[in-house]
Amino acid sequence: MSTESYLMMPLQRLPRYQTILTDLKKFTSDNHSDSPLINSAFKQLTELLTEIKSSVNLSEHNSVRKLMTVAKSIDGGEHLLMFDRRFEREGALNMLSVRKTSAERKKSLLSQKNYYCFLFNDVFILCWVKKTDFSTGRTFDHVETVYLTDITKCEGNEDEKEIILHFKSKETWTLGPRTSKETGLWLASFKTCIEEQRGALSPRTAKSKASLHAVKSDSPHSTRHGRRRAATHSTPSTKPSSDKP
């Protein structure tokens, strides 16, 4: 059974309990000692189901499904599955430059400039495209996980198609989207998520801002400085190397 199926099981049980209580009500006389308890349980369960139904947001459900899809497509991506993680954006980005870091690390990050990246509300994932299969889709090799709390500033220029990330370690990355439009979308998503991680925005407000940017741009997507898997050198992250999102 898939992870998604396991996560859905608790919700799927609730309607079954309602069916059982409905049958119990039907075959239990009103003067039976269990009748008040059955009626109370049925009422509470019905109210709970109504509340769940009214609070479930389709976009949130789609975000969870997208998170699972991304996790499955990345080698070792199971660690990405967290209940409060929200998918924001994905796409191809070129690593244009890496500054204020060791020569070894700079060479490592620039060894293959073309990355496929995933942005979540708390992490930024750099990958290399491993292969593309028409039946299973693209799969990726994980390169690096960047915690948004380790980014001190995000700036850029849509006309020059540049996104500049400044880290607490003083390291600086310059990333290049393919178009000016994509640059604007990435910048908006980065800034919204970084603000959320700093506590300046609640998750609900941040999500609304990200959705607004996507709507305005007519985009089909709504899109911790970790360590490179195969690298032996240290990274700018202040978090332990064993800490995974």
Image (cartoon, rainbow, N blue to C red):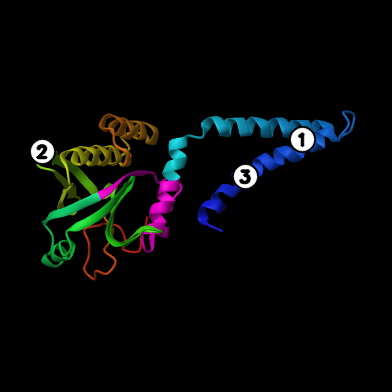
Residue occupied by mark 2: 159
At numbered mark 3, what does the secondary structure look like: helix, strand or loop?
A: helix
Residue occupied by mark 1: 22
Q: Check disc 1 and give the amino acid type.
A: Thr
Other residues around mark 3 within 10 Å, as few (<14) / some (14–19) / many (≥20):
few
Other residues around mark 2 within 10 Å, as few (<14) / some (14–19) / many (≥20):
few
Give yes or no for contact between labels 2 and 1 (Cβ–Cβ under 8 Å). no
Residue 164 position in % (x across, y down): 15, 46
> Which residue is painted at 60% across and 49% down in the image?
9
Residue occupied by mark 3: 12
Dot 2 or dot 1: first in sequence order is 1
> Which residue is painted at 64% across and 30% down in the image?
47
Magenta region, residue range: 65-91
The residues tagged by marks 3 and 2 sit, at their Cα atoms, a distance apart of 49 Å
The residues tagged by marks 2 and 1 sit, at their Cα atoms, a distance apart of 63 Å
> Which residue is painted at 87% across and 34% down in the image?
33
